[in-house]
Image (cartoon, helix red, strand yellow):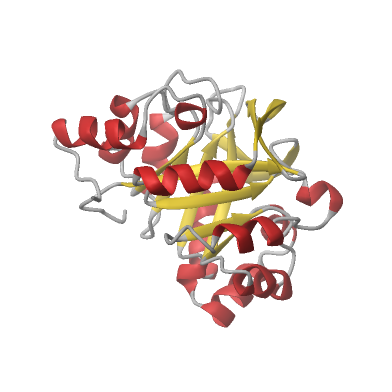
Amino acid sequence: MAKAEKIRLIARLEVKNDQLVKGVQLEGLRKLGDPHDFARAYYEAGIDEILYLDIVASLYERNNLSQIVRRTTGDVFIPITVGGGLRSVEDVHKILQQGADKAAINTAAIKDPSIITRVAEAYGSQCMVLSIQAKRRRDGSGWEAYYDNGREHSGLDAVEWAKRGVALGAGEILLTSVDSEGLGRGMDRELIRAVAGAVNVPVIAAGGAAGPEDVALAAEDGACAVALSSLLHYKRMGVGQLKAALAARGVGVRR
């Protein structure tokens, strides 16, 4: 388990075409506006990182975020991770050229795990983020990793896949609980503990955070970062408020 003295807060911006969207359990998408405007506002409010996900990219086998990322890096000066539709080292090279710092890969890694090693060797393991969309099995025996925005079964155990991904070169795990995503009813703490306890790289927890208590609990469970969407997008709590509330709970935050 990788320990972090200070939890990172990441704004998770899911994009379809040129619109920021938000769904529930990765379905029923609602358009919210220009993703760059949201990224800029979160940056000015003190968010630590930006995560852009092209949520239909794997379906169309391409990533359409280059223009958005290039625009964002013109006035947002914090780390940016880009995911969705990245199928090759060349695809990763292109988004890094636009100013991204890290690449999050899910579908392509499940179909060809060697891409994890190839990206890590080309750009360093810190650039290679393995994205895992986990759903709890109906019989309660752990979680399965899904792909294509939570639509397709992989047959892979999510915890074992995380361990394998790290062994292949992934420097970070983006762990999304599909069951909790968008509901705002709390995060899957058991999932976070299982994955964070199985790997020695930072785990970014995503899905279900409703407020500072959920972020604090995720940190307690081993997450080094929490990716937030609904909480921020719907203005349920601002970045500054969230950091102040976490600090009051004794959770280290970046200033």
Residue ID at (83%, 56%): 61
Q: Does residue 159 appear in this view?
A: no
Count of numbered circles in the view: 0
Apparent side of residue 243 relative to residue 158 in the rendered image (left or right): left
In the figure, 182 relative to 121: above or below?
above
Where is residue 151? Give x, y as percent: 75, 35
State the image quarter where residue 16 is shown.
top right
Apparent side of residue 123 relative to residue 210 in the rendered image (left or right): right
Residue ID at (66%, 64%): 113
In the figure, 5 relative to 247: above or below?
below
Q: Residue furthest right?
A: 60
Compare residues 19 and 213 and report the one nearer the observer.
19
Compare residues 134 and 137 and report the one nearer the observer.
134
Where is residue 37? Give x, y as percent: 56, 43
Compare residues 57 and 178 and report the one nearer the observer.
57
Where is residue 43? Give x, y as percent: 42, 49
Apparent side of residue 99 relative to residue 87 in the rendered image (left or right): left
Where is residue 35? Give x, y as percent: 61, 43
State the image quarter where residue 82 is shown.
bottom right
Q: Residue furthest bottom?
A: 122
Compare residues 212 and 105 and report the one nearer the observer.
212
In the figure, 156 relative to 186: above or below?
below
Residue ID at (45%, 69%): 126
Q: Does residue 66 appear in this view?
A: yes
